[in-house]
């Protein structure tokens, strides 16, 4: 069976010629219907009798136009646009090609080439996506939306900080609020632990694609593709879902807008200007907020699951990294050298993998197969070149140089270390 591709006008012409062959219409009427002369009607009718519908299909269909630009020119133009004008529209790109490169092309030609190369989208593709509302979850604890809102919560009275917001999807009820310096993994560890100890384990948390919740690097090497926060929730049998857009988690986004209005003004009336005072006030504010804005769930069931003896929150909410022991039973973490105490267990672990657990309160543990190993620290910053002999009159400059180097080590260490309580000048680890 042969398939013949025909346009709408070619199909209409075939219908007219079939009627002409069956003498339902005259030649003059066929010429009028097809918009051609009598001689062209006779030629088309003769070809239709010999070859059928294939005689009416254009022989140029599927072949490049005789007036098409050379493929070399198209490749050159796309290369120039991709290198220098990737964010230009077709009109402006055409102007620059003519002004700076001496290449004169029509705007529509450039537009079609850019669309084929993925450098431009047509009008329909550029329309803003429509985000339709979805129904709430049926029960409390089925889905908890979480987000961090960085804002001047204390206006000019205090520092800029972040408010971690936990809101129930079924009721729009504020479940937990906490002021922190910024969105870090350890801050989410502490806030989530407080949530679980109060309400139990929800079915799932719903977040954005912040690095705390999702590995953003597509080509990330090593690891299991799970962030530290995701690993903690997995250990507690709690799902984490990342929204593709802010509109998808609209309930917590709208709550952030309300909080940035009402909470800021309430704290202004009370003269609250510190993070500690703000956290102390949040429970009172949440009660009033929920009384005004919370909705009744579709079902009265609470799907929070109680914590059991198998849920080790200390172990779950710890920063965990694997390290390989050296032959001398040493490993390095946070720019500090750790030395395992030789005993019957540790002597057999040379060149094997162990896990370093960094707890939010600053405690550290080194573990292998569930057993905590004894260790001591050997901080490289305390090393002194014992062979150096310095004249007494030059001791001052040498000590100043050593102090400067130690300061540089402190700064480099704090920029890489996970945040602990009391640390300053740090960059928080996420993920």
Image (cartoon, rainbow, N blue to C red):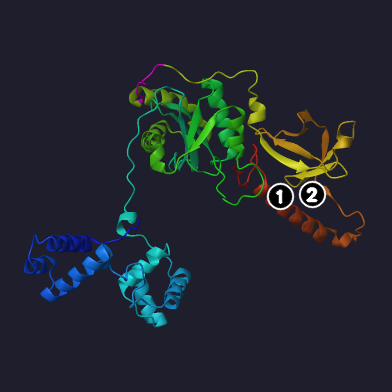
307 lies left or right of 399: left
Extreme residue toward the bottom, this view = 102
Say which quadrant the N terminus sits in.
Answer: bottom left
Q: What span is in magenta?
A: 294-300
Give the answer, above or below, for where 413 lies relative to 360. below
Image x and y of residue 256, in percent: 40, 37
Give the answer, above or below, for where 401 lies relative to 104. above
Work out whether residue 227 or residue 123 is closer to the camera in this orientation and state it. 123
Using the rendered view, name the quadrant where residue 110 is placed. Answer: bottom left
Work out whether residue 23 or residue 174 is closer to the camera in this orientation and state it. 23
Q: CA distance from mark 1 to mark 2?
A: 9 Å
Query: In the rendered image, which residue does mark 2 sit on?
Result: 381
Mark 1 or 2 closer to N-term?
A: 2
Image x and y of residue 39, in percent: 13, 76
What secondary structure is the stretch in magenta mostly built from?
loop
- Residue at x 38% of width, y 37% of height: 250
Q: Residues at badges 1 and 2 in contact (C-beta under 8 Å)?
A: yes
> What is the crowding at mark 2: few (fewer than 14 residues within 10 Å), some, or many (at least 20)?
some
- Note whether residue 235 is visible: yes
- Note whether residue 274 is visible: no
- Residue at x 63% of width, y 26% of height: 313
Using the rendered view, name the quadrant where residue 328 is placed. Answer: top right
The secondary element bearing badge 2 is classed as helix
Indicate whether residue 139 is drawn in magenta. Answer: no
Label annotation for residue 410? 1
> What is the crowding at mark 1: few (fewer than 14 residues within 10 Å), some, or many (at least 20)?
some
Q: Across the whole image, how many numbered discs are drawn on residues? A: 2
Image x and y of residue 292, in percent: 33, 24
- Residue at x 58% of width, y 31% of height: 233
Say which quadrant the C terminus sits in.
Answer: top right
Image x and y of residue 136, in percent: 37, 28
């Amino acid at each position: 069976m042969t398939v013949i591709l025909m346009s709408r006008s070619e199909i209409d012409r075939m219908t007219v010629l079939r009627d002409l062959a069956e003498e339902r219409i005259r030649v003059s009427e066929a010429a009028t219907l097809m918009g051609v002369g009598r001689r062209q009607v006779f030629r088309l009718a003769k070809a239709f009798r010999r070859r059928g519908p294939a005689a009416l299909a254009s022989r140029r269909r599927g072949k490049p136009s005789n007036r098409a630009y050379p493929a070399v020119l198209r490749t050159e133009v796309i290369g120039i646009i991709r290198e220098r004008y990737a964010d230009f529209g077709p009109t402006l790109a055409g102007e620059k090609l003519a002004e700076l490169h001496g290449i004169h092309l029509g705007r529509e030609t450039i537009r079609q080439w850019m669309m084929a190369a993925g450098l431009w989208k047509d009008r329909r593709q550029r329309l803003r996506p429509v985000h339709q509302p979805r129904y709430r979850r049926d029960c409390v604890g089925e889905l908890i939306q979480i987000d961090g809102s960085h804002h001047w919560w204390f206006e000019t009275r205090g520092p800029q900080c972040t408010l971690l917001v936990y809101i129930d999807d079924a009721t729009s009820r504020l479940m937990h609020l906490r002021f922190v310096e910024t969105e870090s993994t350890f801050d989410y560890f502490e806030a989530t632990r407080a949530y679980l100890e109060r309400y139990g384990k929800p079915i799932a948390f719903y977040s954005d694609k912040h690095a705390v919740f999702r590995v953003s690097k597509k080509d990330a090497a090593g690891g299991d593709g799970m962030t530290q926060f995701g690993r903690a929730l997995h250990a507690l049998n709690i799902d984490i879902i990342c929204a593709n857009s802010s509109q998808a988690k609209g309930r917590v986004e709208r709550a952030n807008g309300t909080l940035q209005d009402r909470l800021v003004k309430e704290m202004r009336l009370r003269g609250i200007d510190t993070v500690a005072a703000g956290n102390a006030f949040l429970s009172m504010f949440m009660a009033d907020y929920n009384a005004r804005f919370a909705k009744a769930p579709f079902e009265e069931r609470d799907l929070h699951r109680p914590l059991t003896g198998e849920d080790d929150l200390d172990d779950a909410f710890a920063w965990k990294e694997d390290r390989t022991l050296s032959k001398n039973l040493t490993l390095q973490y946070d720019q500090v050298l750790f030395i395992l105490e030789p005993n019957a267990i540790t002597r057999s672990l040379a060149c094997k993998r162990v896990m370093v657990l960094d707890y939010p309160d600053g405690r550290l543990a080194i573990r292998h197969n569930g057993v905590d190993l004894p260790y001591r620290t050997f901080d490289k910053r305390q090393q002194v070149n014992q062979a150096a002999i310095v004249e007494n009159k030059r001791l001052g400059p040498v000590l100043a140089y050593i102090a400067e180097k130690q300061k540089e080590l402190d700064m480099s260490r704090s920029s890489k270390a996970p945040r602990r309580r009391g640390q300053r000048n740090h960059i928080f680890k996420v993920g």
